Amino acid sequence: MNEKYIPDEWKIIEEGFVPKENRLSESIFSLGNEHMGMRGFFEESYSGDSLQGTYIAGIYYPDKTRVGWWKNGYPEFFAKVLNATNWIGINISINGQSLDLAQCEVSDFKRELDMKQGLLTRTFVAKDAKGQESSVKFKRFLSMQSPHIACIHVSVTPLNYGGKIVFEPYLDGDISNEDSNYGEKFWVPIDKKSNEQYIVLTMETKKTAFWLSTATESKVYKDGIEIACERNVIEKEKYISTSLETAVNQGQEISLIKYVSVCTSRDYDKDELEAQATTLLKQALNTGYNQLFEQHCIVMQKKWDASDVVIEGDIKAQQGIRYNIFQLNQTYTGKDPRLNIGPKGFTGEKYGGCTYWDTEAFCFPFYLYTDQEVAKNLLYYRYLHLPQAKENAAKLGFKGALYPMVTMDGQECHNEWEITFEEIHRNGAIAYAIYNYTNYTGDSSYLETYGIEVLVELCRFWADRVTYQPRKDKYMILGVTGPNEYENNVNNNWYTNLMASWTLAYTLENLRELKIKACSHYLEVVDKLGLDEAETLIWKEINEKMYFPTVEELAIFEQNDLYMDKEQTLVSDLPSEALPLNKNWSWDRILRSCFIKQADVIQGIYFFPEQFDAGCKQRNFDFYEPRTVHESSLSPSIYAIVACQIGYQDKAHEMYLRTARLDLDNYNDDTDDGVHLTSMVGSWLVLIQGFAGVSVHENQLSFNPFVPKQWQGYSFKINFRGRDLKIKVDSGQLEISQTTGTPMQVVVHQETYQCSMDKFLVVPLNG
Ligand code: BGC
């Protein structure tokens, strides 16, 4: 654990420059605006260790698969989001000496991310090899209002010299991915242009042939007044820059504003791409830095109005949850249904920027409770990928649809047999998200128009994937990996069987309802999918006769067949040097052990809280939690929520801490690769679904709140069926203020209350 960043309610602050922690800070200080994003690397040249990552949503490359032993069914490639043209770069030369923090004495270094405004600032004093001292300040934002636009503001004040400063703002397309499988570069140059108003660079990805045009222009100011500079264009094969030279006196501030526009062939035709990039750039130049920043802040404020969480009495907890919400809102805004949420967002290369089950199983509720249109787009994304999911199932010899474990464009691109072929529980999360949306919003239009097709194809997969076992007269699912990736090729993973069986039941129920409603789409679906009664009768039988392993003597669910045959030891029995197991034990030893990577049985209990009584939840929690090493950052939040349901408040808070500041405190010592975006949502899940106990049952919003004893209280905002609600909980009471929408009833600790815009609801809480 590394408590590097200074606690603050709205800011992430780093004081002092520690080169060996530079990659960590580059991850933490990442910015994004759904269309593009980047790590917090430096604008000026830096010869120290750095991962200069600039990513453009949806621009990927299918890198040829690299495995030791090829298995039939493996995808040919692993799609990865590409590190793209570096457009923030500004080389700075002071009397011929390049400003490079790796070569300077650095003092008063401060990096600050203002989460309210989405503004990254960096200030420092640098003394170069000639003894020249400069006070330098950078500011950068990626517009949330105009996602193709970004601005960088830099100012340099000579402290003990005068002379010549040359700024060289550039566009550099000669970029590679650190995770390239064969050391290949993925970009080829198409064009570059320069004139008196701008420079523009167009690059193309190999294989996928995406085009990316970046255009830039800079203005220079002396003591706040714009000046003309000597301007020279420098061109290399994949690089273009303008050098702007000016004389400066000691104590005189010289600044430069770099305006950038970033456009891709995903959004515009290739033959108009450059023109589009330059038009947007010109508009940005006309609008000017201050107004662009104001417009950006208005959108940021709207995001915070919808999704902010306030924690009273614990500034680190406050900073942690705001940071997590900030990164989620920076990465995915739901404007483009072709996009999704990669586990690292725009903050690193690991996981290739692809979509995992993390989206539906973890991130989905955050968007669902704060902006249902965004949530709907996430569902629609999977609908658009249904044809590829069917191809994927067919490739493995199955009917129906198997959604990929990892994907960029709908095709599977993961290649470890125990995950690609066996971690099929992911299909369950996709069905669950459709249920979650429909249950929360009461809006069945998605389900009726698109969701039902997805559900039918998922059922077809399960019906083909199960094995009938006549000796037990049960259906089983053999050869799978559950969420716990520390056991592979197991039979009857309880969680997988639960998700399969529930999907069949949920689909049948919806088909029945659509038929009763005589929904015109029902007939279309039946016709289009060739669905007949015989097929649905089989689904019914599988659902009724699904096998669920149990441990009778403990009255718990067995994680999978033979789990109880393993040597049963607890995490607390392990010497501390053994942890994390994935770094210290052989894979063979991990697989044979009873230790669990992440919530598995408890994940199922989390999804269906009403199906299991408190005793059942408690017995399973008491058994499985002490065996769980939480070596996936997705794990603690799920345990924390179930802990809340069984009254384990201290345990819930302890687990909450592991998710809330996972990256800020570099809990797993791996944030230098990028933040754990899809796990960050865990802190929001715990606060809303755990501590406040928010759920929707039979169309009623319900709360079971408590305040962890380490806090004084907390408040958050959600939108429920057209009503904006602000909920505040302290140890004495729950308050609900409704600012939009019609009156409704809410349930607090099983009691019903009336809530409306005219009535500020206060419910006393006992104890
Ligand atoms: C977890 C998976 C998850 C993936 C990406 C793995 O460590 O076990 O459940 O989908 O990370 O976050």
Image: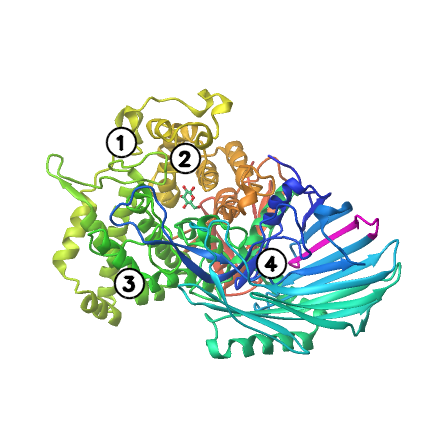
Viewer-proximal residue, 759 or 687? 687
> Is the residue marked 2 within 8 Å of ligand 1, measured from its CB?
yes
What's the residue type where badge 4 is placed?
Answer: Trp
The answer to whether the residues at label 1 and label 4 have Cβ atoms under 8 Å apart is: no
Q: Which residues are magenta?
A: 117-133
Mark 2 or mark 4: whose residue is earlier in sequence:
4
Mark 1 or mark 3: whose residue is earlier in sequence:
3
The residue under the point 44% across, 25% down is 571
Residue 606: quadrant of the picture: top left
**Tag on residue 597?**
2
- SS for callout 4: helix
Q: Nearer the viewer, mark 3 or mark 4?
A: 3
Q: Splitting the image into four quadrants, where does ligand 1 fall?
A: top left
The residue under the point 29% across, 26% down is 564
**Tag on residue 304?**
4
**Tag on residue 387?**
3
The residue under the point 76% across, 63% down is 166
What x and y, as percent, mark residue 422?
29, 43
Residue 517 visible in the snapshot: yes
**CA distance separating discs 2 and 4:** 34 Å
**CA distance separating discs 2 and 3:** 32 Å
Read off the residue under disc 1.
Answer: 550
**Tag on residue 227?**
none
> Is the residue marked 1 within 8 Å of ligand 1, measured from its CB?
no
Q: Above or below — where is 311 with respect to 719?
A: above
- SS for callout 2: loop
